[in-house]
Image: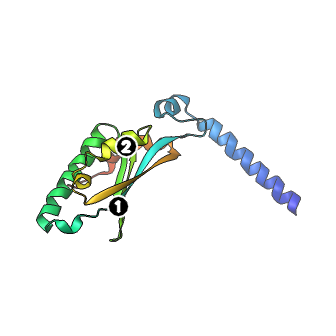
């Protein structure tokens, strides 16, 4: 029985490798900066609740949030921000950014342009991350599924 399961597992693995080799698009992989595994380096930013939130009125926080959203759009237009979004709930972990940059220093410089970071309403924890190179296609695809803007 073990021999049959191992043989079937090997067969399925071979089919998967064969399929991957049939659909591999070398030009696309190169355009997206993919390595042989279809992966690449990014920098992920975890957005955390800042220490100064309570110092601002609701109106001031609304203005800071507007600047935060405008900054997200600006970084996306620059081609540096690939993914951004909030987490559900009201915990200290507020959201994420995934940057198309090679160093933590580049990501830090980008996060420091955010009005919410500058105001202390948010703070960032930056980590280098190894993820699918296909994420680079999101900025091209996102407008195709977006009916109305968040601003």
Q: Is residue 2 left or right of residue 41?
A: right
Residue 49 versus residue 101 in the image, above or below: below
Mark sitting on residue 130: none
Sequence-first disc among 1 and 2? 1
Q: Residue at x 18, y 55 (%)?
A: 66
Q: Nearer the viewer, residue 99 or 2?
A: 99
Q: Is residue 18 visible?
A: yes
Percent of width and height locating residue 51? 28, 64
Query: Residue 61: x percent and y percent?
Result: 17, 62
Q: Residue furthest left?
A: 59
The quarter of the picture where the C terminus appears is bottom left
| Image x and y of residue 12, in percent | 73, 51
Residue at (21, 48) in percent of width and height: 70
- Please identify the quarter of the rendering in which residue 75 is found: top left
Q: Is residue 149 visible?
A: no
Query: Mark 1 — residue?
Result: 48
**Residue 36, position in %: x, y?**
61, 35
Instruction: Please tell me which residue is depicted at 16% across the width and 65% down the height of the picture.
Output: 56
Q: Residue at x 71, y 45 (%)?
A: 15
Q: Nearer the viewer, residue 142 or 90?
A: 90
In the displayed structure, 115 sits above or below 35; it is below
Residue 77's place in the image compared with 116, above or below, is above
Residue hosting label 2: 107
Q: Is residue 6 above or below residue 80?
A: below
Q: Is residue 145 left or right of residue 61?
A: right
């Amino acid at each position: 029985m073990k021999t049959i399961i191992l043989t079937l597992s090997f067969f399925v693995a071979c089919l998967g490798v064969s399929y991957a080799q049939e659909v591999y698009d070398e030009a696309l992989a190169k355009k997206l900066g993919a390595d042989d595994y279809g992966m690449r380096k990014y920098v992920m930013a975890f957005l955390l609740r800042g220490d100064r939130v309570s110092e601002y009125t609701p109106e001031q926080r609304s203005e800071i949030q507007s600047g935060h959203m405008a900054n997200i759009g600006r970084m996306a237009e620059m081609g540096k921000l690939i993914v951004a979004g909030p987490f559900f709930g009201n915990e200290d972990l507020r959201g994420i950014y995934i940057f198309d940059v090679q160093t933590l220093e580049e990501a830090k410089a980008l996060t420091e342009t955010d009005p919410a970071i500058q105001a202390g309403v948010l703070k960032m924890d930056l980590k280098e991350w190894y993820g699918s190179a296909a994420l680079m296609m999101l900025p091209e695809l996102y407008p195709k599924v977006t009916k109305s803007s968040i601003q």
